[in-house]
Image: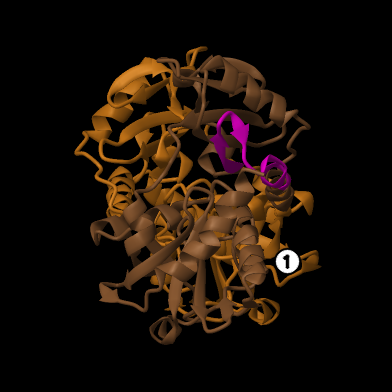
Chain colours: A brown, B orange
Amino acid sequence: MSEIRHAIKNGEIILEENAVVNVTLSAVQSNFSVYEALRVLKRHVVHLDDHINRLYNSANSIHLPLPVVDWNNEINKLIKKDNIEDCTMRILVVGTDTPTWFITWTKLLTYPDSYYKEGVDVITYNGERFLPQSKTGNLLVNFLSREEAKRNNAFEALLVDRLGKILEGSRSNFYVLKGDTIKTAPDEKVLDGITRISVLRAGRELGYKIDYTSPSPEEIWSSDAIFISSTSMGAMPIRSVDGKKCPFDSDKVAAICSLVRKWECD
Amino acid sequence: MSEIRHAIKNGEIILEENAVVNVTLSAVQSNFSVYEALRVLKRHVVHLDDHINRLYNSANSIHLPLPVVDWNNEINKLIKKDNIEDCTMRILVVGTDTPTWFITWTKLLTYPDSYYKEGVDVITYNGERFLPQSKTGNLLVNFLSREEAKRNNAFEALLVDRLGKILEGSRSNFYVLKGDTIKTAPDEKVLDGITRISVLRAGRELGYKIDYTSPSPEEIWSSDAIFISSTSMGAMPIRSVDGKKCPFDSDKVAAICSLVRKWECD
């Protein structure tokens, strides 16, 4: 990989340090933006079409007029320019009438094996995302809940809605596995996670039924295992919630994660 | 006023075009920021102490470590540099550990006299602000509701919460005036508006009782007048809601507005 990092702005290769927006723009001041985070593995973008579809869906949901762009070509320009093998890539589109779009990248976000074998610690946090199905720039609740998790030495925060149900994590989807059933919030209440689709497909292939009901925190304690998923995490088991050890069966989660990761390379 | 506009970044005078933030920063991506909009009239900043207090309160509420700055001095540097008489000024502080702060300005936001005499049209919009008492950068619901208002040729959107109550406007506080009472949402549910404080003080001086209960949309139709307030608007009467003419008594609102504007010059 090259030393100086580049980015793409409206189709033009620029230095990453020039990937900036002016703070006097109303779209910048008001998070009138949509984004996607993608995995590039061996110079190949995982599930690109799904991410691009979601990007346009997110834009439509807030009336952001996203232009037609050959995203595959643009991403590959950046992969070539910076000689990238693996990375986490980010597409950001900032409104309004003539949106400005950026592609930037960072080192591939990966997690230690121990997270998958031993599970991660999470906290609960009272909060809900606005327009949960869309990936917009309106991310303060995600940021604050994650900071609260960090202050508690936890890896992730589970967002508990006004009805006391767990909808999703600050940057993940959430599942309760019990017997032959995987329970997760209904689609319309959470991010339409691309890894979530794979997780639920893997669950079905492994013989689980899917119950689209938002789980209550109390159900954690009578489950077999609980876990989270995201593009970067795959499926990751949880070992404690708010400092209390929870039921933990990493093998069951690992079986799901292994199918999810296999399909990424197809 | 000078032709080329300047701004201040962390105490340094820069060209406004250089008032930029990098889109790879997590604080920028997640609206981990707070702001204030101020009125400068005849080179004097209106209610500066109140705005600065609120800025620090907003920062505290999201654990943003805002440094001590001589804001009066910084604002006056910009007033001198660009030879500003009147303007709307904006302070923006973007986290995280070492926040970056900006002061920028635009032409003073004012409204035609007809808005105050004839009233403005508003719509209702289902939505609530996250952390309503704080002025954070998490503003998508404000932006989207205002865009929806524009599409309906309306001036403002009133945000209706999950319980069906009107809490505030997209950029204003909201009031229902009936008989000897002014009704407005309780402090903890809405922005701690600096003009709101003046409006309620003016209401009391004019003999009104203040009822801190979130009004229902139905109460609009049996009121004497409804109105909104903000730093730029003062107190502004509403003449229609969702396309339907509403009770309208601009004299009562004008009496309040005139006290609010008088105190700005004290």
Instruction: Give the percent coordinates (x, y) of residue A211.
Output: 63, 79
Q: Does residue B38 appear in the picture of this structure?
A: no
Residue for badge 1: B241
A223, above or below A27, in the image? below
Secondary structure beneath disc 1? strand
Q: Nearer the viewer, residue B71 or A94?
A: A94
Instruction: Give the percent coordinates (x, y) of residue A235.
Output: 49, 59
Residue drawn where x is 34% and y is 77% of the image: A246
A253, above or below B4, in the image? below
User: Would you identify the image quadrant in which residue B199 lies?
Assistant: bottom left
B192, above or below A99, in the image? below
Instruction: Give the percent coordinates (x, y) of residue B207.
Output: 43, 75
Instruction: Give the percent coordinates (x, y) of residue B37.
Output: 44, 42
Please state the extent of the stretch shown in magenta in the rendering: A34-53
Q: Nearer the viewer, residue A240 or B184?
A: A240
* Few, some or many residues within 10 Å of mark 1 (<14, 14–19, 20+): many
Q: Nearer the viewer, residue A256 or A11?
A: A256
User: Would you identify the image quadrant in which residue A79 lies?
Assistant: top right
Residue drawn where x is 68% and y is 40% of the image: A48
Amino acid tagged 1: Val
Tag count? 1
Residue drawn where x is 41% and y is 68% of the image: A250
Give the left or right position of residue B131, taking residue A58 as reference: left
Q: Is residue A152 magenta?
A: no
B214, above or below A259, in the image? below
Instruction: Chain letter for mark 1, please.
Output: B
Q: Nearer the viewer, residue A106 or A113?
A: A113
Query: Residue lying furthest top in this view?
Result: B3
Residue drawn where x is 65% and y is 55% of the image: B145
Q: Does residue A215 appear in the picture of this structure?
A: yes
